[in-house]
Amino acid sequence: MTMRWRLRMAAAERGVWTAAHLRRLLASEAGYEMSAPSVAALMAAEPAQVKLTTLAALCTALQCSPNDLLELDTAADPRNGMRIGEWRSDHSPRNGSGMALTPSLLP
């Protein structure tokens, strides 16, 4: 599974070209204060993690949804040929019914 961070594209589609402009929008529209380096880092590269409060503030400031900021690649998992999100009923761990449910992302 691949997630793509689309903040720069989503911001550009809304006329926001700089981290400074986004930082001002976060403060004025969402009441959310972030340091200039933190906003610049979010615009420059894909973060390893994003707090839900930050995601919500970005969505408020840009008047968008999380789907505009994150793109999920649902291509087949090359390790097992299954599509992301499919479940298979083999392997452990077992649920209470005795049937094993393992996400397709696991080998």
Image (cartoon, rainbow, N blue to C red):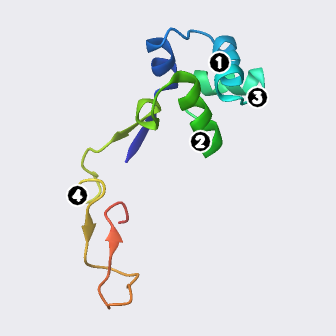
Q: Is residue 2 left or right of residue 35?
A: left
Q: Which numbered dot is residue 25?
A: 1
- Is 53 placed above or below 38 here? below
**Residue at 41%, 81% in the rendered image:** 93
For the residues labelled 4 and 2, the Cα–Cα distance comes to 25 Å
For label 4, count other residues whose C-alpha is less than 10 Å away and answer few (under 14), some (14-19) or many (20+). some
The three-letter amino acid code for the residue at tag 2 is Ala
Q: Which of the two marks, 2 or 1, is nearer to us in this view? A: 1
- Residue 8, given in percent of the width and then of the height, sits at 51, 19
- Is 42 placed above or below 102 here? above
Which of the 4 image quadrants contains residue 82? bottom left
Q: What residue is shown with label 4?
A: 82
- Residue 69, given in percent of the width and then of the height, sits at 47, 31
Q: What residue is shown with label 2?
A: 48
Assess whether mark 3 and mark 2 are in contact (beta carbons under 8 angstroms): no
**Residue at 76%, 28% in the rendered image:** 33
The three-letter amino acid code for the residue at tag 4 is Met
For the residues labelled 3 and 4, the Cα–Cα distance comes to 42 Å
The answer to whether any part of residue 34 appears in the image is yes
For label 2, count other residues whose C-alpha is less than 10 Å away and answer few (under 14), some (14-19) or many (20+). few
Looking at the image, tell me whether mark 4 or mark 1 is earlier in sequence order: 1
Looking at the image, tell me whether mark 4 or mark 2 is earlier in sequence order: 2
Q: What residue is shown with label 3?
A: 33
